[in-house]
Amino acid sequence: MNILYDERVDGALPDVDLPALLKALRNALPDLTILHRAEDLKPYECDGLCAYRTVPLLVVLPERLEQVQTLLQLCHQRGVPVVARGAGTGLSGGALPLAKGILLVMARFNRILEINPEGRFARVQPGVRNLSISQAAAPYGLYYAPDPSSQIACSIGGNVAENAGGVHCLKYGLTVHNLLKVEILTVEGERLTLGSDALDSPGFDLLALFTGSEGMLGIVTEVTVKLLPKPQVARVLLASFDCVEDAGRAVAEIIGAGIIPGGLEMMDNLAIRAAEDFIHAGYPVDAAAILLCELDGVEADVHDDCERVAAVLTQAGAREVRLACDEAERARFWAGRKNAFPAVGRISPDYYCMDGTIPRRELPRVLKGISALSEQYGLRVANVFHAGDGNMHPLILFDANLPGELERAEAIGGKILELCVAVGGSITGEHGVGREKINQMCAQFNSDEITLFHAVKAAFDPQGLLNPGKNIPTLHRCAEFGAMHVHHGQLPFPNLERF
Amino acid sequence: MNILYDERVDGALPDVDLPALLKALRNALPDLTILHRAEDLKPYECDGLCAYRTVPLLVVLPERLEQVQTLLQLCHQRGVPVVARGAGTGLSGGALPLAKGILLVMARFNRILEINPEGRFARVQPGVRNLSISQAAAPYGLYYAPDPSSQIACSIGGNVAENAGGVHCLKYGLTVHNLLKVEILTVEGERLTLGSDALDSPGFDLLALFTGSEGMLGIVTEVTVKLLPKPQVARVLLASFDCVEDAGRAVAEIIGAGIIPGGLEMMDNLAIRAAEDFIHAGYPVDAAAILLCELDGVEADVHDDCERVAAVLTQAGAREVRLACDEAERARFWAGRKNAFPAVGRISPDYYCMDGTIPRRELPRVLKGISALSEQYGLRVANVFHAGDGNMHPLILFDANLPGELERAEAIGGKILELCVAVGGSITGEHGVGREKINQMCAQFNSDEITLFHAVKAAFDPQGLLNPGKNIPTLHRCAEFGAMHVHHGQLPFPNLERF
C-alpha cells in the first residue's frame, strides 16, 4: 500500500548518534524497556491514521514517573526529539513517530488512582482507557462524559492531548470541559500541576491551553476528570429524510427550538447502507439521510422533549420518525452509528476520515459542496457526523493500490476542509491537526496567528523537542503550501456561491 | 482614608516624557479624547477595589478600533505601559492605573453588533454591559448566563479579562464556558481572532488562555458570547441553620445527591442581618446561616428536585426550609443576596471582599478557620458566597480611619487566602488576582509555574507593556514576600489541624 510521507520534518531534524544515545539511556535507566530492533519498532510506525508512517528511532515504555523524568532530562540535554503516544488510536497522525526521535509510549501508566464520588472526580494515570473510567465510576451512578467512538481503546492522556470529543459532547462538552487538573512533565522533566481541585484557578488558564496541544507543550502524567451523574432516562429518535439538505436544516431547527439533545447524529445514504449491512441496526436503507437524536435527563423532561423534537423533525420534512421502543433497540440504533467507520471499511479497500467543523446553519450548503467535490474528484464520500456540533466526518472511499487514488483522496480531503473554513468553520472538530492537517492550518490562520502559536510553544519548549512537525506549521511551510488564508471567508472558497 | 500603595511596580517602570507623548498622541490621533489634567484623571485612580489608588499618567477614551490600534502601536514604539479598563467594577485592582502608564478606557465601545437567535450567539463590543446582552436577547427567549452581582454595570470586556462568574455559574459555567470568539488587538496593534463560530478550534486554545488573563495578553475589541434559552421555571428554597458548619455540609450533600442547582448561595448571621436590615428580604435574622438554592428547568423536573433538595436540607440539620411562594418572594430572596455587599457597607465604615475558592467538602473546616482568624485579628468577618462552587466571599469589616485597621484587614485577608490554598483551593474564584492578590500567587504556585506564566506572557507581550505589575508576580517579589509555597497542602497552613 502507498503511504504519504513528508520528508520535510525528519529532514530538518539533526542526526542522532544512536549507539551513544542507547548507551546513555541504558546507563541512566537500566530498568527501562527500550525497543530498538527493526521488527520491534515496526508496530509503532503509525497511529490510527495509517496513511502516514515513519519507523521511530527508538521506542521506550516507561512504567514510573521518575523514568519519564530522567528520559526527558536526557533528551533535553542531547537535543533529541520526543513524541508521546497513548493508545495510538488518534486519527490525525498526532503520534506519528520521527525517524530521528524517541517514541515515548505511556500505555503502561494504566492505573485508576482514585474514584471520588463525593467530590465527583476520578484521578487516573494517562494510559487508562476512556471507557474504563466510566466503568469504575458506574457503581456510584457516575460516568465520564466525553465518549470518542474509540473509547473502548483510546486512553485519557491521548484524549487530553487531542481534546477529544464524541457523540455526547454537544450537551456535555469536550475533554477540556470535563477536566479538573492535569499533572505534566515539562520538556526539562519538571513536574507541574495545571488546574486545581477548585472551580477556577488564578493565573493564566494553562490547563485549557494544554488540552488539545497535541503533545507539543509537555507530557501528561496524571489526569483528574470530572464525573457526572448518569441521566435517569435516555431515549433515541430515528428520523428518515428523502433529502440530505432537509436533514441538515432539521438539525439547526432542533437546536433553534431550545433543545440540547444528549446526542444528535447524521448519516447519509452511503453510510446508512454500509452500517445496516454490517450491524443490522434497523436503519431505512432507502433514506437519503437519517438523524439520530438522543434525549436524556429525568423522565418527564425527556418525554416532553421527545414530542417537541418529533414535531420539529416532521415539520422539517422527515418522512418517518421512530422512537426506539426499548433499551435494546436504542443500543442497536447507536451501534450502527458507532460502527459506521468500520462498516465503511467493509465496502472500500481504504477510507480517509475527515473532521471539519462548521456553523450548523451551513450544513445544507456544505453537504451540497461535498457532493460536488466527490463528483469532481471521482471518489465516493460517505457522511457520518456529530450534526448537532456541526462536526462533520466525511469518509472518503478509495483504493490505495490504484495509482494516484491516495493522493486524490488527500486532495479532496484538503478541499473539504478549506470549504469548512470558507463558511466560517474549522479544519478539525475533535481529531486534532497532527501531521494530517498541518497544511490546512495555513488556510485557517494568518501569519500573525501562527507566529503567536510558535511563541506560545517556545514558552514551554524553546528548542522545539516535543512532537516537532505537528499541529503548528512553520511560516515557511505555509509559503510553500501556497495556501490562501481563507479565515472568516474573506477570501472566498472558489465557487462557494454555487453550493 | 488610608490607602494601600505598592511603589514597587511604578518604581520599576521607566520615566515617560509626558509632553512629548501627548504631542505624539495628538498628532497621530487628533480626534481621540485624551484626559490629562489632574481633576480629570482623579476619577480613574481606582477600580472597584478602592483600597488601592494610583492616578494614571493619561486617560484615553477611544471610540473606534483604528484609534486603539494606532495608540497601541505608538505606545509599543515608545515603551509606554497600557492598562485597559472596562466599567471599572473589578474587585481585585485589575484595572488599577499606573503613574507612568496610559489608562485605556474601552467604555465607549458600547454597541451590540448582532443578536443571532438561530446561531444562539450575540456579537458585542467590549464596553457593552453584561445585563444589557440578556436584555437584548430576551425577546427571543434567550439570555447570557454568567451573572456577576455587578452585572448592571460591569462590561463584557472586563468579564472576559477576569473570567467573571456569578450566582448561576455553578450550573452554567464561568465566562470562558460561555464564549465563542474574541477579537483582540495585540500589544503591537495587530488584529487577531481567538476561537471561532464552530465548536472547537484547531491549534492551541488561545481563547481560553486569553480569558481571565487580566489585560496582560491583549486588548479585547469584540466578543461573541453564547446565548442560552431561558429556563421555563425557576424556584428558590431558603433553608435556615443553627450552625454554620451544618449549612456547609448541606452544600456538599446536595451536589453529592446528583443535583446541580441553578444557584446555591450561603450567608452567615452577620451577612443575614445586614441584608435583612437593608432589603427586608424576609430572612430569619436569628439563623446562624442560610442557604438559598435555586432550581431551574422544566416544571416537572424542578418540582421533583425541590422535594429532593428539601429532604437533603432537613436531613443535614436545617431547622426550616421555605419555598418562595411566588415570583415576588423569589425576587426578594435574591435581592437580599445580591445586595449583601452594599448591605455590609451600611454596618461598617469599610469592608474588604475576599474571593477564595475551596473544594466543597472543606467548607465547614474553612468557615471554622475564618472564625478563628476573625477573633485573632479582632476584625468582624461576614460570609456571603457561592457555596455550590466552593467560591467564598468573606467580607472583612474595618474602619480605614483607625490607624492600622486597613493593614490588619489586608493581613487577615491574606491569611484567609492562604488557608484556602492549604486545603487544596485557590486564591481567587471569580474576581481575579489583579494587584490585590499578587503576593498570594507566590503561595499558590511554585517558581517553575510562575516562570512558565512569564514565558507565556512574553509570547504575547515581550516588553511587558500590557498591565505590568498585575496577576503574575516576579520571582523577586515572591522571594521578598517570603511566602511559603503551600500548593497541594504539601506545606500545611499553620494550625490547619485545629479547624
Image (tube, coloured by chain):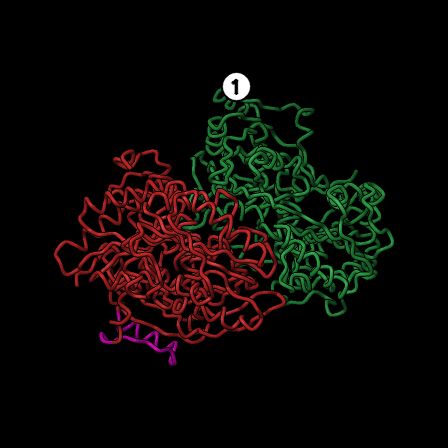
Chain colours: A red, B green
Q: Quadrant of the C terminus of chain B?
A: bottom right
Q: Which residue is mark 1?
A: B31
Specify the farthest residue to the bottom. Answer: A31
User: In this orientation, which residue lies closer to the viewer: B260 or A47?
Assistant: B260
Q: Is residue A132 visible?
A: yes
Residue A357 image point, x, y percent: 37, 47
The answer to if A51 sits in the magenta stretch is: no
Q: Where is A72 relative to A392, above or below? A: below
Q: Disc 1: which chain?
A: B
Left or right, residue B316 beside residue A401? right
Residue B26 image point, x, y percent: 52, 20
Left or right, residue A468 beside residue B299? left
Q: Where is A371 relative to B447, above or below? A: above
User: In this orientation, which residue lies closer to the viewer: A347 or B354?
Assistant: A347
Residue B322 image point, x, y percent: 78, 53
Q: Where is B2 relative to B481, above or below? A: above
CA neighbours of label 1 inside 10 A, class few (<14), some (14 to 19), many (20+): few
Q: Secondary structure at mark 1?
A: loop
User: In this orientation, which residue lies closer to the viewer: A481 or B297?
Assistant: B297
Q: Which residue is found at the position 58% from the left and 58% from the top?
A: A298
Q: Amino acid at mark 1?
A: Asp
Residue B315 sits in which quadrant? bottom right
Residue A401 sits in which quadrant? bottom left
Q: Quadrant of the N terminus of chain B?
A: top right
Residue B366 image point, x, y percent: 73, 61
Q: Where is A167 relative to A245, above or below? A: below
Magenta-colored span: A18-39
Q: Is residue B413 visible?
A: no
User: In this orientation, which residue lies closer to the viewer: A157 or A58?
Assistant: A157
